Image: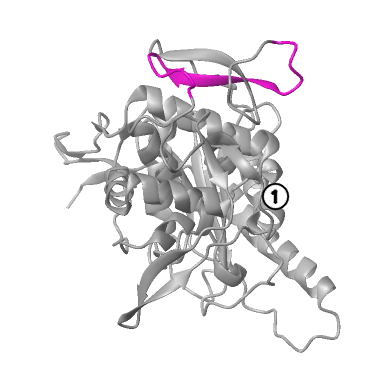
Amino acid sequence: GGLRIFTSLDLEMQRNATEAVQEGVKGIEKALAGKRKGATQNLAGLEGALVAIEPATGAIRAMVGGVDYGKSQFNRVVQARRQPGSAFKPFVYAAAFERGFTPATVVDDFPVSFSIPQNGRYVDWSPENYDHKFRGPVTLRQALEESINVPTVRLLEAVGVDPVARLAHRLGILSDLRPEYGLALGVSEVNDLELTSAYAVFANQGRYLPPTAIRRVVSPTGEVLQLADRVGERVLSEDLAFIMTSVLQGAVERGTAKGGRVPGWRGAAKTGTSQDAADLWFVGYTPTLAAGLWVGYDQPRTLGTHETAGRLAAPVWADFMRRALKGVPSETVLIPEGILPVRVNYQTGLPTDAGDPGAITEYFVRGALPERESAGLVT
């Protein structure tokens, strides 16, 4: 009918994404095969999916739904729903920060047991950390940067399952989220597009824009019939979006997301490894680009019980981001007026001086300086 349709696709970025996924998945298969010499398990069929979104507009710049479109047209970015594992944890922490917790709040990493419903009766469930170790009191920053499970479940208990689910939905998670403590560890399935667009909210100072592949539609006479939303909706305060970015930058600098470092950029990211390492996720962003990567088998099975997203998926994500950001001027996230920087000790979260070898700059919403909360959650 003579319509002109302008998409958001960046052809060069799409080529980079395709190559990064194809080469990355092939490299992971090779690494797994090297570990399993003589094993009978079939390693063929490993898949990957990647989507890249412009946080400021919601524009989908690249989308790779699988390793080979010729063999499978199933789009794993939008059609596959998988457990995000620890990639869901930022929503638990964001909900906690909305309720007055801070990155310096201390939570106990000790054994804990919960009574949960299962098959019509209540059973005891004791969450474990990946390394089966307990660290004692840790700050919320350390708990998220190092992706420690037990403090995260304790935090979910303190904040409440429903507030966490509501916040995740506000930020763009469309899938149903089961009301259970396991939500803290990412047991409710989501797709790559919704997870990445929710992270883009942190990059966009707390504003959500629905992801779109169409910028505008113009009639033969030049009339604009459809225009993508470029304003969005504020779903998180700018202050809290900044704090979340700061903690996720810490995950890249010294936490589980170290493998996602991109030279010249201070990226913010989180790893996700689902139960039995059946799903590997790496989701992160810079101010100009958010990207989410998933790796796994279409029929869920383990990639190896000791495999992690930090080891296998992070380098693939970093490879794509290096290609996508080549030649793009690096941007610094500005500190909002409502944020107060304070020197604190990384381990204790308490104010300290520059002479402390464990000192870091922590960020607080003005009026919420680090204190020792006396609730049962923390000490």
Q: Nearer the viewer, residue 161 or 44?
A: 161
Residue at image coords 17%, 34%: 222
Q: Main secondary structure of the magenta part?
A: loop
Residue 262 x, y percent position in the rendering: 67, 35
Residue ID at (28%, 46%): 163
Q: Position of residue 147 (x, y in %)?
A: 59, 48
Identify the residue at image location x=45%, y=17%: 369
The local crowd at label 1, few if under 14, some if 14 to 19, many if 20 or more residues have their Cα within 10 Å, is: many
The reply to whether residue 81 is visible in this rendering is no
For the question of whether residue 99 can be seen, the reply is yes
Q: Quadrant of residue 295?
A: bottom right
Q: Residue furthest bottom?
A: 40
Q: Report the side of 249 relative to 120 (left or right).
A: right
Indicate yes or no whether the magenta region holds residue 303. Answer: no
Q: Secondary structure at mark 1?
A: helix
Tell me residue 224's x, y (percent): 16, 35
Q: Is residue 11 above or below residue 86?
A: above
Instruction: Give the residue number, with chain letter if any, for mark 1.
Output: 315
Q: Quadrant of residue 346?
A: top right
Q: Which residues are magenta?
A: 354-371
Tell me which corner region of the image, top left, top right, bottom left or bottom right, holds residue 98. top left
- Asked whether, in this view, residue 357 is left or right of residue 146, the answer is right
Q: Colour scheme in the image?
A: one colour
Count of marks placed on residues: 1
Residues 371 and 343: in front is 371
**Image height of 94 relative to 72, above or below:** above
Q: Amino acid at mark 1?
A: Pro
> Is 219 placed left or right of 293 in the picture?
left
Residue found 65% across the figure and 31% down from its top: 347
- In terms of depth relative to the viewer, which is nearer, 59 or 314? 314
